[in-house]
Image (cartoon, coloured by chain):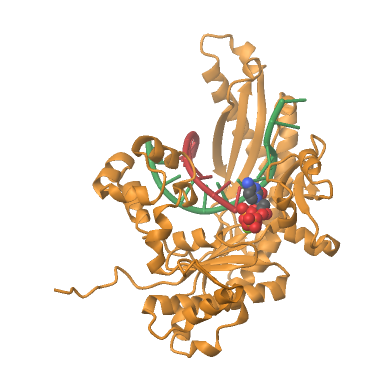
Chain colours: A orange, B green, C red
Amino acid sequence: MPLARRPASRIRVIAHVDLDCFYVQVEQRRQPQLRGKPTAVIQYNSWKGGACIAVGYEARKCGVKRSMRGDAAKAVCPDLNLVQVPVLHEKADLSIYRDAGSEVVAVLSRVGKCERASIDEVYLDVTEAAERLSSKDLSTLVSEEASTSHIVGLPQVRWLESSAKLGTKEWFCRPDASREDHLLACGAIIIADIRLAVLAETEFTCSAGVAHNKMLAKLSSGMHKPAQQTLVPSSAVESLLATLPISKIGKLGGKLGQELEGELGVKTVGDLLQFSELKLQDMYGPNTGTWLWNTARGINGDEVQDRTLPKSHSSGKTFPGPRALKTLETVVYWLKELAETLQLRLDEDLSQNNRTAHLLTIHASCHIVSRATEAPKFSSKSRPLRYGVDKIVEDSRYLFERSLHEFCSHQSAGKEQSEITSSWAVTGLSLTASNIMAKPMVKT
DNA sequence: CATGGTGTTTAC
DNA sequence: GTAAACAC
Ligand SMILES: Nc1ccn([C@H]2C[C@H](O)[C@@H](COP(=O)(O)OP(=O)(O)OP(=O)(O)O)O2)c(=O)n1
Ligand SMILES: [Mg+2]
């Protein structure tokens, strides 16, 4: 007897938008003569030419990779243009990239609920806009950009170059499409339009994935880059996931993914299907277990959060190797440099968004000089945030000294206290301002 | 000698 | 409140 197939939940249309080689595009907009040339963005350059943090597509072709030293990148790509991240208060200053990301969010947020997921990634819930479009005749609405979408699972065998485009437009307009596929097509038209608006208004290209949940949207945004978009119809999900390495799925790129492979022999998302929800819960806890079981089936209920502003600001710096800080005075000096740039961020947030932060947290990474080969220990401490560079320095210094005493007393088991307290070295410091809230309106 | 500078979420 | 994990 055919059961009425009740949808588990309302059909959603979710997009993930990811800017192409983002910092490089920001620099190419500042210096248009770099457009079309192999380009990478590096931070610092005195030691081995700095390190690449973003690499343009021309440079990727000749083998330049993120985290590659500037010198090594030049060696593999002699024509490479290297642009340095701006420096403020003796540290890398990412403001211009954050601001550029905000420009993009301002455009994208016009189409629906918008979540800023990172400096260059946004999730959009375009369900409502797609529903509105779904009653129209799509044949007149499929733009050139929409018609060049990639559709996962469309026949891979293509006899002619032009058949790809033809096939795609036909897929969009086919009259026997399911409600799901039709809404997906509507979403893709909307996303193609907004990507063109991003290009027109910011000069940045981006790529997008359009699917029925966040996991699949994110997965697909990376499938065709740069300046392209990819759709995931539900009918394509099973085959797509069957052979997909689990590391391609969000949150499975690290330890949990390694454990899955080591403990269950799971290499692909499809491999996960054989395990019951109970078994997965048993091994990885109820939340993670259920999440894994759903993920194996392409099910993901995570909502797009309505949030375009960050929840925290931080300013940090590492002091690797011989540059480690060994006196309280140098630590305080750097706390002041960090406090200066953090306060600038707080000023910006207050004037632009009317928000204030209420919690200050310091993270410090520390080791014992005589055992420099051992992994450094991290610690964090928090206290209420008071505005003003001097207050931030005072408060973060207080937190640092408390951490240091804890650290030294742990390390000094069986040793002379003085021997230890004089031998620490700080390899990293960061200050974070969080608990950011809209400032209460003042009665007038 | 040495990716570094961010940011969010979850577990305890 | 703090640590760990995961990510760009
Ligand atoms: N470990 C990392 C990863 C990324 N970024 C910064 C630089 C990137 O330009 C930006 C976006 O990261 P992506 O992973 O999206 O990489 P790109 O946008 O550079 O390239 P793609 O076109 O592959 O998205 O974030 C960074 O500073 N450190
Ligand atoms: Mg990107």
Residue A417 shows in this picture: yes
Residue A427 position, x and y percent, is 66, 30
Using residue A251 as the reference point, say whether residue A107 is left or right of it.
Answer: right
Q: Position of residue A103 (x, y in %)?
A: 68, 68
Does A432 appear above or below A127?
above
Give how far across and how far down residue A350 sits, in percent.
65, 61
Residue farthest right in this picture: A33
Between residue A16 and residue A392, name the one nearer to us: A16
* Residue furthest out toward the front: A159
Instruction: Decide which of A330, A38 is in the foreground and name it.
Output: A38
Q: Could you tell me which quadrant the C terminus of chain A lies in?
A: bottom right
Q: How many marks?
A: 0
The residue at the point 72 percent across, 55 percent down is A56
**In x, y percent, where is residue A31?**
84, 61
In the displayed structure, A413 sits above or below A158; it is above
Task: State the residue at coordinates (68%, 46%).
Answer: A66
Residue at image location 39% in from the left, 80% down from the top: A177
Residue under the point 49% across and 45% down: A253
Q: Quadrant of residue A144?
A: bottom right
Indicate the quadrant of ligand 2 in the picture. Answer: bottom right
| A176 horizontally vs A26: left or right | left
Q: Quadrant of the N terminus of chain A?
A: bottom left
Question: In this view of the protein, which residue sits in the foreground, A39 or A16?
Answer: A39
Note whether residue A111 is visible: no
Closer to the camera in the image, A178 or A70: A178
